[in-house]
Amino acid sequence: MFVALKIKRFDPERKPAAWWSKYRIEAGPAERVLDLLVRVKDELDGSLTFRRSCAHGICGSDAMRINGVNKLACKTLVHELGSRITIEPLLGLRVIKDLVVDIEPFLAAYRRVKPYLINDEAPPEGGRERRQSPDQRMRYNDTTKCILCACCTAACPVFWADGDYLGPAAIVTAHRFLFDSRDRGAADHTAALVDAVGVWRCRTIFQCTLSCPREIQITKAIAEVKDAIVRRTILGK
Amino acid sequence: MTRVHTFDAIIVGAGGAGLMAALHAARGADVAVISKMYPTRSHTGTAQGGVAAPLGNMEEDRWEWYMYDTVKGGDYLVDQDAAEILARESVDTVLELEHLGLPFDRTEDGRIEQRRFGGHTREFGKSPVMRSCKSADRTGHMILQTLYQNCIRRTIRFFDEFFVLDLIFEDGAARGVVAVEIATGEAHLFRAKAVLLATGGFGRMFAVTSNAHSLSGDLVASVLRNGLPLEDMEFFQFHPTGIYKMGILLSEAARGEGGILLNGAGERFMERYAPKLMDLAPRDIISRIIQQEIRAGRGVEGKDYVYLDIRPETINRCHSAPHGRMVTAAQLEAKLPDIIEMMRVYQGIDPMKAPVPTQPTAHYAMGGIPTDCDGRVLSAGLDAVPGLFAAGECACVSVHGANRLGTNSLVDLLVFGRRSGRAMDAFCSGNGPAELSPRAGEEALAELSRLQKTRGPERAGVLRAAMQRCMTDHVGVYRTAQGLEEALQTLRELKERYHRIGLSDSGRRWNTEVLEAYELGCLLDLAETTAASALQRTESRGAHFREDFPERDDANWLRHTLAFRAGRPEAAGPGLRPGGPVSEGIRFDRRPVSITKFQPEAREY
């Protein structure tokens, strides 16, 4: 089949404003959108610029807006989209060139929730593993899947309106540690969540959940984080 | 305007080996990690099935059994001093990761849960053992996240999306690297007492591969170009179960949990070849047998693929799950969520209801930059090159020999990443900083600038595709002198044509076109070295199978290969010896294998 591929371009070294490039290319229904981008770059326009690496939905490099929805280009197949495919960079993050956006603010938010296990107690005798039951392990399983692709945060209208908002991905990361039975750093993880641009900015819009390529139940995780903060700070539990 | 940075230690690559080394080197040294991507994009994150350690949480296990499996799995080309370190220290590194926060799966009593994996056995080959520590089928993701998170905690300095072009040597010692900041196109010199290469593999030289686009071996090529040897480049692993045509990895964990392979006749063909381990035999053997079935016309519908069947009814009928237990679809979905999703997304098949087409996929380089057991890079004379270290897939310690066991890539990068980090820290405390010559990095920058201006008739994408096709066709699972000579001929023509490529993007910012062309040049060098190394080894061992020399030949070939390119010998330091030219531009030497506990035997499973 032939697809009409429309890609939003931006390169301040060439033009001050963005423009659209259109290509009509042959594509198989089971091809990835990333395959089409690679083919355009290899065969038609070497200047087309995008991030990519693993090409099977794990590294999180190639998040972009595909037919209006944030997706990974390597995990979206042509048959899901039909013969007209429109590709734009993620919204809410500064566009650097073509489909490449500046994810530094996104990672700065990630770092603010202290994204690491905090537990300075000595490990069990003989240096063995800290014990954790299968139920305790599964309690935070969903939020360990995050690949930091930014699909969720860049789909959040609250983030579009205020780039200082921590955004769903950072809250997902906080959830991963807050609900880990081995973690002792709840106060550290939540410090950034309770300030003016923290978790209470979430308006439960579900855009994050709908756009997550790892199918993390993000809105649910955010609600659980809010609940945990209320219990800790107001109810003292 | 070139910017200059100074650190004690520079680490190139932010996957498992680089980050593990960073955490340990940073205990004393001022460390910077440079990567051409954001660290969490590194290919360690795609590792699925697990990391081996004889914890004995599920059943009795011993490091001696694990060492034996590693040595035998590598067809006795493994350096046994290194394999002993791997087997012994695996326990401690896995526990260290748990303490750093890694969310391993758990047993009912709260310990780390383990599963079976190919070639891992109890009592020196008797039967499969549960040794792989895992987090569903996303173990690599958890390792990468946990290490990166702890690097954030330790405020380690990162230079993300900086493309390292070349190493800098002064007086035979590594003194730093030259890099381009991708966002601006600016050149940066990094001056350091020690440099660790942790850049991963270079599987992108093949058409069908599980490897990420980024795995182009830039710094492995730099080592070669600087006159240092590469070791055992002929040994490239083909993983038996890649998604048909796409090459995406479907973890061996699928078979660890009971999945089986079926040919076109619906026959569980591994029964015939490996009566004890069957579908859990090592990867080289299974890939070879799959190709053999296909050649005999027993592929599915006579085509070039076989089936991987993980349907619960199949597993239960064959009693192929651990200890012959019954399994349910829900249990399999919990243990293998990502690969089941990949089969659904990329193949459009529900693997709980139907088997999926798979074929061998280029997966892992056993060879690479020769190092000792502390990551010190070895020169031609097997002396350590001062200040230069390597760890992870780009290095060849060699713990994998002629064929790596599943899970051992993660063990390797953790154990030897940690040892390299510690060795770098010690090296830095005993050595002062060095000045760089005013010409440092000049050659690599000139090459990049030449590429950027080039307007020849050849397209880089066309050359890349031709290289990949040539490597998959002639330097794959089965090899012959004729095919390898043809491959070398093709690769040399492609190198000629590479000098006449034309690029279209003249911008400085985010010019991935020129960087991809640079990567292609690196891949061409490594492809040529791989093909030439395969041609000179006239025996079959592990992943290297010569149809014209089908037997293992311990009398002549129980040796590591060292491959050199005519280059800049002054960087190689002492010990550069002349060798006989086997192919144009590449010459070979050999080095002995360390054999301590296990004498070579016939390799049966």
Image (tube, coloured by chain):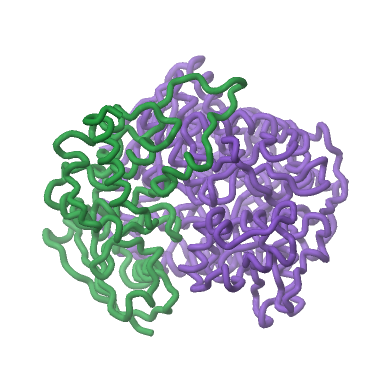
Chain colours: A green, B purple
Instruction: Work out which quarter of the rendered image holds the N terminus of chain B and state it.
Output: top left
Above or below B526: residue A74:
below
Question: Residue B155, position in %: x, y?
Answer: 35, 27
The residue lying toward the viewer, choosing from B604 and B578, is: B604
| Residue B228 in sight in this render | no
Q: Which residue is at 28% across, 74% downward?
A: A85
Indicate the quadrant where residue A201 lies: top left
Question: Residue B252, position in %: x, y?
Answer: 63, 55
Above or below B48: residue B360:
below
The residue lying toward the viewer, choosing from B82 and B242, is: B242
Instruction: Work out which quarter of the rendered image holds the C terminus of chain B and state it.
Output: bottom right
Name of the residue lying farthest toward the bottom = A1
| Residue A137 in sight in this render | yes
Indicate the quadrant where residue A175 lies: top left
Q: Which residue is at 52% across, 24% downward?
A: B424
The residue lying toward the viewer, choosing from B23 and B539, is: B23
The residue lying toward the viewer, choosing from B131 and B445, is: B131
Indicate the quadrant where residue B351 lies: bottom right
Q: Which residue is at 36% across, 74% downward?
A: A80
Is B57 placed left or right of A234 in the picture? right
Total marks drawn?
0
Question: Residue B435, position in %: x, y?
Answer: 40, 23
Question: Residue A19, position in %: x, y?
Answer: 16, 67
